[in-house]
Amino acid sequence: MANVRTIRLSRDLEDFIVHAPESVVLTAYDEERMKFVKFAVSGPPETLYEGSVFQGVLKLPADFPRRAPDAVLETPIWHPNIGLSGKICYDLISDWQETG
């Protein structure tokens, strides 16, 4: 029987596949232990980031979905919503809800 973590991650991945913008793709995920989801984001056109591809990872905590994943951009970048360590700071995670 699937646990809450597996059900939620499966549902979120399916939702992402259906609704994701073309500029964001999943590049890998940990099917066995479900500890991470890797992604790539293309820089938006007509910005300083155009033509760039940024690699990132969602690190899923052991108590996911009770606690939000940490989002980290692995490609170095200057952006007001991204810390020096690459940690992404955004409202979606700070307003995280266990039921998605």
Image: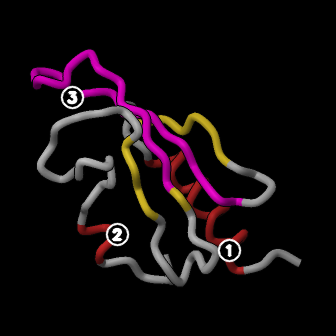
In the current view of this chain or complex, which residue is farthest to the front? 85
Is residue 37 left or right of 74 when viewed as pictured? right
Range of residues picked out in magenta: 34-58
| Of the two numbered discs 2 and 3 in the rendering, the one whose residue sits closer to the viewer | 2
Q: Position of residue 69 (x, y in %)?
A: 48, 66
Q: Amino acid at mark 3?
A: Pro
Q: Residues within 10 Å of mark 1 (few under 14, many from 20)?
A: some
Against 38, residue 46 (above or below) is: above
Between the C-alphas of marks 1 and 2, the distance is: 17 Å
Q: Nearer the viewer, residue 14 or 44?
A: 44
Q: Position of residue 49 (x, y in %)?
A: 19, 25
The tag earlier along the polypeptide, 2 or 3, is 3
For numbered disc 1, what is the local secondary structure? Answer: helix
For numbered disc 2, what is the local secondary structure? Answer: helix
Against 9, residue 19 (above or below) is: above
The tag earlier along the polypeptide, 1 or 2, is 1
Q: Amino acid at mark 2?
A: Ile
The tag earlier along the polypeptide, 1 or 3, is 1
Q: Nearer the viewer, residue 13 or 82?
A: 82
Residue at x 69%, y 80% (from the top left corner): 4
Against 26, residue 61 (above or below) is: below
Against 77, residue 16 (above or below) is: below
Q: What residue sits right under mark 2 in the picture?
A: 93
Instruction: Quadrant for the N terminus, please.
Output: bottom right
For numbered disc 3, what is the local secondary structure? Answer: loop
Q: What residue sits right under mark 3 in the picture?
A: 44
